[in-house]
Image: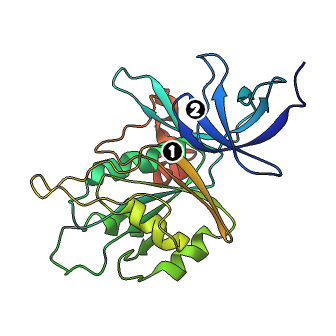
Amino acid sequence: MNEPALTGCVIESYGRRVIVAPASGEPLPCKLRGRKLDVVAGDEVRIERHDGSDDWTVVERLPRRNVLSRSDSRGVAESIAANLDQLGIVVAPRPASDPFIVDRYVAGACYAGIAPLLIVNKCDLPADAGDLSFVRPFEALDLPVHHVSAKAGLGLDALIESLRGKRTMLAGQSGVGKSSLLNALAGDAVRATGRLSDRSGEGRHTTVSSAILRLPWGELADSPGVRDYAPPVVAPTDVQIGYPEIHARAQGCRF
């Protein structure tokens, strides 16, 4: 005989193991039932436990509002996080940020119906520390842009106001300071931080799971740093959705 089922939100995911926060009570470690169950941080799920067992099991994923996905090496869509309000794309002058990855993150967010914003970290570095000229076209397109320094605490109050009452995922290349920014926003060292590789200048992957942190003013979702990102493959007729400035004019375009 099973105990009564509970529902809750996945707040941390380690492959086939997750942490679920029920509506009341402490978060619970759970395993997934079946290999086909696709569950990521942010998913609302139903969990059960058999009498005599200490293990909770995720038996069902409830309907999603949205899901941020990426295309893996085989071109198959892979879920990253679910039920997001915003995607905060973190860039920095050092290590050099790839503007094309930023483009792809913006497109991926728009395909999923998630509002993108750009967070320029390490603004305390000298003006010649790196080329951030690619940020200006995003500003011209009215994409929200915040200039902050996680290390020096600059610009964080204004950023928090943009995150207030929302679930925002922080994404970006390794080394741009996502985990340090999350720590600064949370007011505590909640995720591991790492140092840039002195040899290559590329960031090490310091976040090992996708996770959601609940704060008094909103929720932050974190995920492993990446060196590349590609949105899932979409139908040719839907490509314009990833480019809001084009999509807004598409209805009146004879082409």
Q: In what quadrant of the picture does the N terminus appear?
A: top right
Residue 79 placement, left or right of 198 = right
Residue at left 36%, top 60%?
193
Q: Earlier in the sequence, mark 2 or mark 1?
A: 2
In the drawing, what numbered circle is on residue 210?
Answer: 1
User: In the figure, residue 82 lies in which quadrant?
Assistant: top right
User: Residue at coordinates 76% horizontally, 25% vertically from top-left?
Assistant: 53
Q: Which residue appears at 60% of the width and 46% of the height? A: 113
Instruction: Give the side of residue 165 with respect to residue 221, left or right.
Output: right
Q: Amino acid at mark 2?
A: Arg
Q: 147 or 238: nearer the eye? A: 147
In the rendered structure, the answer to whether residue 40 lies left or right of residue 72 reads: right
Image coordinates of residue 218 in percent, x first then y, are 66, 65
Q: Residue furthest left?
A: 199
Residue named by callout 2: 17
Horizontal and vertical percent for residue 137?
34, 65
